[in-house]
Image (cartoon, rainbow, N blue to C red):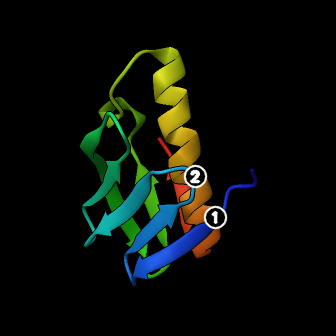
Amino acid sequence: MEETFTRESPTKVVSSLGYSVETLGRTGIQYIDATHNVGLSAEGLMINAYSLYTSSIPGDGDEKARILANVQKAFAFSRVGLQII
């Protein structure tokens, strides 16, 4: 099944695979899936870009990589820049 995205609100993107990513003003990103509901540390850089601090992503290497990839896909769908720090 090909992954698709919908915009639930101006700040929230939902994936057909069951996770969502929402920007929280200029200081954070909320990531929710079946096993996580976490606030990720981020900074709004300008109107259409964020920096995401990978140290705020929970889990081991594989889990962290999966969450990061999901956030990147949601941002790409939204056409919002994402800088990984």
Q: Position of residue 43 (x, y in %)?
A: 33, 59
Q: Position of residue 50 (x, y in %)?
A: 44, 62
The label on residue 20 is: none
Mark 2: give few (<14), some (14-19) or many (20+) Cα within 10 Å: some
Q: Is residue 81 left or right of residue 36?
A: right
Element marked by disc 2: helix
Element marked by disc 1: helix
Looking at the image, the residue that sits furthest to the front is 1
Give the amino acid at mark 1: Ala
Give the amino acid at mark 2: Gln
Residue 57 vs residue 18, the one in the foreground? 18
Q: Please report the residue visible at 46 percent of the width from the left and 27 percent of the height from the top.
A: 64
Q: Is residue 46 left or right of residue 78?
A: left
The label on residue 72 is: 2
Q: Please report the residue visible at 24 percent of the width from the left and 62 percent of the height from the top.
A: 27
Looking at the image, the residue that sits furthest to the top is 60
Q: Please report the residue visible at 30 percent of the width from the left and 37 percent of the height from the top.
A: 36
Residue picked out by circle 1: 76
Q: Determine whether label 2 and label 1 are within 8 Å by CB.
A: yes
In three-dimensional space, the C-alpha distance between marks 2 and 1, rounded to whole angstroms, equals 6 Å
Which quadrant of the figure has residue 16?
Answer: bottom right
